[in-house]
Image (tube, helix red, strand yellow):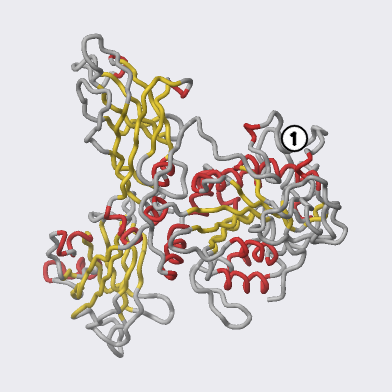
C-alpha cells in the first residue's frame, strides 16, 4: 500500500496511576513520575513522561497519552516509574531512583473494561519491586463517527462533443507520503453540467483515518464507456473545513483542471463549482466499545493435510518440520493466532484438520480435531495449536481433495447468535495450499454464514495458483448461492502468504488478514441491533493464568512437566489424553470403545465433525 499502512485505527487515551509505590526518600515520600514506551521493531521507543507528583506513593497523573490501537497488531507498551532526584537533569533517567516497571499489551487495556492493574517489577520483569500501576484506556470520540455527505456541482466544463458531460465524483484521502487513496466513487449522472449525486455514509475512519485535519481530494470526471474517463477538475480541503460544528465555513470549492489552467493563465477561473449540500457527523458504537463491554472474540483453526502439501519428511513439503525455520503453516498460526488469542479469555481454541486419513478416522476426513478428541476438540493457547498441529502431521496420511464445506458446517455450529448479555464472535482461520474442489458447496455455506457472528480468514501457503480463491473474498462482487441468495455482508478475507515473503511476514500477514475484522464485526452487531454492554472489570496479573482446561482438552503447557504433544522425531509416546474421547457411543463405526472412568462429555459441545458435508 502506498505510503505505508493506513488501515483502520482507533485512538485510545491512556491514563496512568499508581498505588503502594516504594519509598526511596529518607525524610519524605517519593516524588514519582512515569515514562511510557512503545516497543518498536528493535528497541523501546519513548513516547513521553508524566508530570512529577511530590511526596506521594499513590499518584494519579494528569498527563495522558494518545496512542493508535490496531486490532490486527500486537502492540507492546511499558510504563517505568522513577523517583525524581535531579530536577536539572530531568530527562537523564539514570539520575533518578527506579521504582519499577510494567509491560502490557494495548489489547489488554482495551479488553480490561475499566482498568488494567499490573504489579511493578524490576527491569525485564525479573522480580517484584513493590507497588502497582493502573492503566485506563478511553477511546477518543473522533474514532466513533460516521460521516454523511451529499455533493453537487454547478457549471461544469462540457466534455462531450455531441452533448453535455456525464460527471461522477471521487473522494481520496491523503496518505503519509503525500499520495492519495480513493475512498469513495459516485455513480455517473448522465448528460448534465449541474449534477447532484446521491448522499452516502461511511466511517470517518475510512474517509480520513479518523483525523479531522487529514487532507481530502475531490475529483470530478466525465464518464466514458471505454473507461478512459476525462478529468473535469479537482479540489482539496480538510473534513474540519466543511463541518459546521467544528468551525467549518466552506460550502463550495472551485474545481481546477491544471492543464486548462496552464493554457488559459490568468483568464482561467475554474472548471465548475463543487458544492456540499450537507456534511453531517453520526455518532456510532465502536469495536472498542464492544470489547470493553466483555464481548469475546473466539478463534477456530482449520489446517490442510491434503496430499498436495507433500510428504512431511520431504524437505520440500509445506509441512516439513525444519528445526531452523518455521514452515508456512507454523508462520501463519503464529502471526494470526497470537493476536486473536488476546481477545479470548479462556484460551480454548477448537483446532481441526481436513483432507487426511488416520487410524483414528474412518476413511478420508474433511473435518477432524487435531487432538482426535471429537467431543472436546479445543486445545490450550497458541502453543497448544502448534503442539496439536505437529502431532497430527506425524499421525495422518495426507490425502485429499481440498474441501471446505465440512469445516464450515462445523464452524457454524459454534457461531450461535449472541444476545445482548452474552456477546461473542467467531473467527475461522483456514490455512490451505490449494484451490478448493467444492466451490459450489463452500459458496452456499459462506452465504449462509454471512448471517452469523462469523468472519473467515483464508491463508494460502505454497506456490499454487490461488486466483480462483479470490472469488470467495467478495469485496466487490457479493457471493450468491445456488438458490440465488446473496450474502448479507462480506465475511471472507483471502491472503496468499507468499505475498509477504520478502517483508516482515508475521507482522504484514496479520495486518492483511485481520484489518477487516472490526468492520465485519460491527456490520453484524448493527444488523442484529446488539449494543455494547457497559465496561466490565477484568484483572490481568502476571501471576494469574486462565483456569486449567476441562478434562479432555489439551493441557496448559506450564502446568505439566512435558509438552502435551511429543516433539516430532522424538519417538515419545503420545499421552493418554490424545485418544478419542469415546465416553458415549462412537459417532463413527470403528471408533475405539469407551475408556473406563472417563468423565462425561460436555453437553454444550458441538456434534462431531461429519466426514462428508451435510446436504445443503
| Front-lying residue, 217 or 457 | 457
Question: Which quadrant of the figure contains the C terminus?
Answer: bottom right
Give the side of residue 349 with respect to residue 419, left or right.
right
**How many residues crowd mark 1 within 10 Å: few (<14), some (14–19), many (20+)?**
some
Total marks in image = 1
Residue occupying image coordinates x 35% and y 46%:
68
415, above or below 93, in the image: below
Q: Name the residue carrying label 1.
A: 567
| Front-lying residue, 137 or 494 | 137
How far across and down, in percent of the image, does residue 428 sit?
59, 57
Give the side of residue 207 with respect to residue 459, left or right.
left
| Front-lying residue, 85 or 254 | 85
Give the side of residue 282 with respect to residue 5, left or right.
left
Which element is circle 1 on?
loop
Residue occupying image coordinates x 52% and y 71%:
451
Q: Residue furthest bottom?
A: 162
How far across and down, in percent of the image, does residue 598 sit?
77, 46
426, above or below 137, in the image: below
How far across and down, in percent of the image, does residue 90 sit?
23, 20
Amino acid at each position: 500500500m502506498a505510503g505505508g499502512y493506513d488501515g483502520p485505527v482507533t485512538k485510545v487515551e491512556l491514563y496512568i496511576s499508581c498505588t503502594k509505590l516504594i519509598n526511596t526518600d529518607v525524610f519524605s515520600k517519593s516524588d514519582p513520575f512515569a515514562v511510557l514506551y512503545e516497543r518498536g521493531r528493535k528497541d523501546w521507543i519513548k513516547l513521553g513522561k508524566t508530570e512529577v507528583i511530590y511526596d506521594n506513593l499513590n499518584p494519579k497523573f494528569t498527563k495522558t497519552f494518545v496512542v493508535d490501537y490496531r486490532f490486527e497488531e500486537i502492540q507492546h507498551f511499558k510504563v517505568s516509574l522513577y523517583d525524581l532526584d535531579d530536577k536539572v537533569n530531568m530527562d537523564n533517567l539514570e539520575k533518578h531512583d527506579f521504582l519499577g516497571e510494567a509491560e502490557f499489551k494495548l489489547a489488554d487495556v482495551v479488553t480490561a473494561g475499566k482498568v488494567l492493574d499490573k504489579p511493578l517489577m524490576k527491569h525485564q520483569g525479573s522480580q517484584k519491586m513493590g507497588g502497582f500501576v493502573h492503566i485506563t484506556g478511553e477511546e477518543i470520540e473522533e474514532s466513533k463517527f460516521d460521516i454523511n455527505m451529499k455533493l453537487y456541482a454547478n457549471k461544469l466544463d462540457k466534455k462531450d462533443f455531441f452533448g453535455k458531460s456525464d460527471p461522477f465524483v471521487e473522494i481520496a484521502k491523503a496518505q503519509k507520503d503525500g499520495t492519495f487513496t480513493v475512498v469513495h466513487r459516485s455513480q455517473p449522472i448522465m448528460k448534465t453540467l449541474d449534477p447532484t449525486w446521491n448522499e452516502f455514509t461511511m466511517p470517518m475512519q475510512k474517509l480520513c483515518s479518523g483525523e479531522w485535519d487529514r487532507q481530502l481530494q475531490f475529483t470530478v470526471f466525465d464518464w466514458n464507456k471505454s473507461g478512459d474517463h476525462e478529468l473535469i477538475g479537482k479540489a482539496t480541503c480538510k473534513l474540519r473545513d466543511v463541518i459546521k460544528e467544528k468551525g467549518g465555513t466552506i460550502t463550495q470549492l472551485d474545481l481546477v483542471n491544471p492543464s486548462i489552467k496552464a493554457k488559459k493563465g490568468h483568464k482561467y477561473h475554474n472548471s465548475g463549482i463543487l458544492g456540499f449540500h450537507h456534511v453531517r457527523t453520526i455518532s456510532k458504537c465502536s469495536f472498542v466499545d464492544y470489547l470493553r463491554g466483555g464481548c469475546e472474540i473466539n478463534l477456530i483453526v482449520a489446517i490442510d493435510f491434503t496430499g498436495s502439501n507433500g510428504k512431511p519428511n520431504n524437505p520440500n513439503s509445506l509441512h516439513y518440520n525444519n528445526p531452523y525455520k518455521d514452515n508456512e503453516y507454523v508462520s501463519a498460526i503464529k502471526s494470526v493466532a497470537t493476536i486473536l488469542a488476546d481477545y479470548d479469555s479462556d484460551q480454548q481454541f477448537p483446532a481441526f484438520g481436513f483432507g487426511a486419513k488416520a487410524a483414528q478416522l474412518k476413511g478420508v476426513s474433511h473435518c477432524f480435531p487435531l487432538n482426535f478428541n471429537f467431543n472436546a476438540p479445543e486445545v490450550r493457547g497458541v502453543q497448544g495449536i502448534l503442539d496439536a498441529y505437529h502431532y497430527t502431521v506425524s499421525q495422518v496420511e495426507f490425502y485429499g481433495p481440498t474441501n471446505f464445506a465440512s469445516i464450515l458446517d462445523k464452524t457454524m455450529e459454534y457461531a450461535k447468535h449472541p444476545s445482548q448479555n452474552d456477546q461473542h464472535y467467531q473467527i475461522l482461520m483456514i490455512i490451505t495450499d490449494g484451490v478448493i474442489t467444492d466451490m459450489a458447496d463452500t459458496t452456499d455455506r459462506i452465504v449462509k454464514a454471512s448471517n452469523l457472528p462469523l468472519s473467515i480468514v483464508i491463508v494460502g501457503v505454497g506456490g499454487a495458483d490461488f486466483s480462483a480463491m479470490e472469488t470467495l473474498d467478495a469485496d466487490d462482487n457479493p457471493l450468491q448461492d445456488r438458490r440465488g441468495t446473496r450474502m448479507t455482508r462480506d465475511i471472507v478475507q483471502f491472503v496468499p502468504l507468499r505475498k509477504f515473503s520478502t517483508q516482515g511476514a508475521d507482522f504484514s500477514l496479520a495486518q492483511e488478514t485481520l484489518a477487516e475484522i472490526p468492520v465485519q464485526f460491527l456490520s453484524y452487531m448493527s444488523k442484529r441491533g446488539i449494543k455494547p454492554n457497559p465496561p466490565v472489570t477484568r484483572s490481568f496479573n502476571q501471576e494469574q493464568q486462565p483456569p486449567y482446561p476441562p478434562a479432555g482438552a489439551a493441557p496448559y503447557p506450564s502446568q505439566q512437566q512435558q509438552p502435551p504433544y511429543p516433539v516430532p522425531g522424538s519417538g515419545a509416546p503420545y499421552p493418554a489424553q490424545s485418544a478419542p474421547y469415546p465416553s458415549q457411543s462412537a459417532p463413527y463405526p470403528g471408533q475405539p470403545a469407551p475408556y473406563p472412568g472417563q468423565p462425561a462429555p460436555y453437553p454444550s459441545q458441538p456434534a462431531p465433525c461429519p466426514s462428508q458435508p451435510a446436504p445443503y
